[in-house]
Image: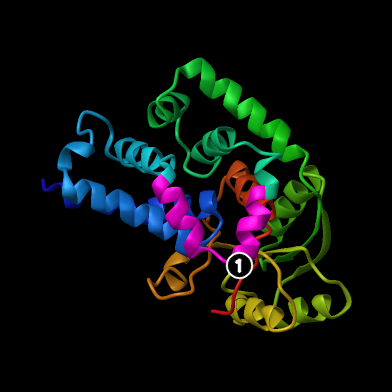
Amino acid sequence: MPLSEIIARDIPYLRRFARALVGSQSGGDAYAAATLEAIVTDPKNFDVSLAPRVSLYRLFLRIWSSVSLNSFADKTSPSPMVGVADRNLEAITPRPRVAFLLSALEEFAPDQIATALDCELSEVSALLDEASREIAMQIATDILIIEDEPMIAMDLEALVLDQGHSVIGIARTHSEALHIVQTKKPGLVLADLRLADGSSGLKAVNDILAGTSVPVIFITAYPEEVLTGAAPEPTFLITKPFRRDTVKAAIAQALFFERKAHLA
C-alpha cells in the first residue's frame, strides 16, 4: 500500500491535534503541512516499524519542537494570541500539555505517548500528573451549553461543574441560546450542530459571535458539516459519542490560549 494511503485517514486527526496544541487554525495547519512535506521529501522520515498514527505524530512533534518552524508558525498567528500563549506557557509547560492532549484528545495509550515523545514510560506518567496539576490552576469561566439531548446536556453540565466552571444556561434551540446570551455573557460555548426544533447550532454560534468574542467547542455527531476544508473551520471539535477526558482537554486548551472563535 502506498505511504500516502497509509497516513491519509490520520491526517484530519493530526490537523485537529495540531490546532489544539498550537491554538490556531493557521499555526496548526502550518505544522501539519510541514510534517507531510517532510514525508514527501524523504519517506524515511516516516518510521514504518511503528503504528502509522504513532509514527505520524512522532514526526509531527519532532518538527513542532524545531526552533525554525516555531518562528514561522508564530508569524502566521495573530500577535495578541501569541502574547496570550507566551504568558500562559509560564503556567503550563509544553511537554506536559502535549502528553495530556495525546492521552485525552487523541486517546493514545501510555506506551504510544512515550514513543511519540521519545521518552520513557515512567516520564509519561509524570508528565500527565504535571499537566493535571497545571491545568487545574487555570481560571474558571462561565459556560453556555447548546445541546438538545437531556442526558448529554446533563453529562456536560456535571463535567463543567467538576472542573470548577459554572453553567449560565443549557439551550435546546437557537432561540433559547440567544435568549440566554442576552442576559449573561459566556466565557466559553459548548455547542451541538443539530438542535431540538430543527434549528442550527452553527447559526446560533454565529449569531452569538456577531455580538461578542468567545471561544467555541463544537460537540457533534456530524463533524463533516464543519470540517469541509474551507476556512474558517473550528479549532476545537469533538465527535460524539465523546470521552469526558476529551472534552476536558478541549476546554483546557480553549481557555489556555484564550482562543476566540470566528464567524463561519
Q: Position of residue 251 (x, y in %)?
A: 66, 52
> Residue drawn at (76%, 54%), measured in percent from left and top?
157
| Residue 132 lies in the magenta-colored region | no
Note whether residue 26 is visible.
yes
Residue furthest out toward the right: 183
Across and down, in percent, residue 60 comes to 36, 43
Image-quadrant location for residue 104:
top right
Q: Is residue 221 visible?
A: no
Asked if residue 78 lies in the magenta stretch, the reply is yes
**Residue closer to the observer: 102 or 221:** 102
Could you tell me which residue is drawn at 69 percent across and 47 percent down?
88
Which range of residues does the magenta coloring cover? 68-86
Callout count: 1
Q: Quadrant of the N terminus?
A: top left
Q: Residues within 10 Å of mark 1 (few under 14, many from 20)?
A: many
Q: Amino acid at mark 1?
A: Asp
Vertical relation: 94 (above or below) 88: above
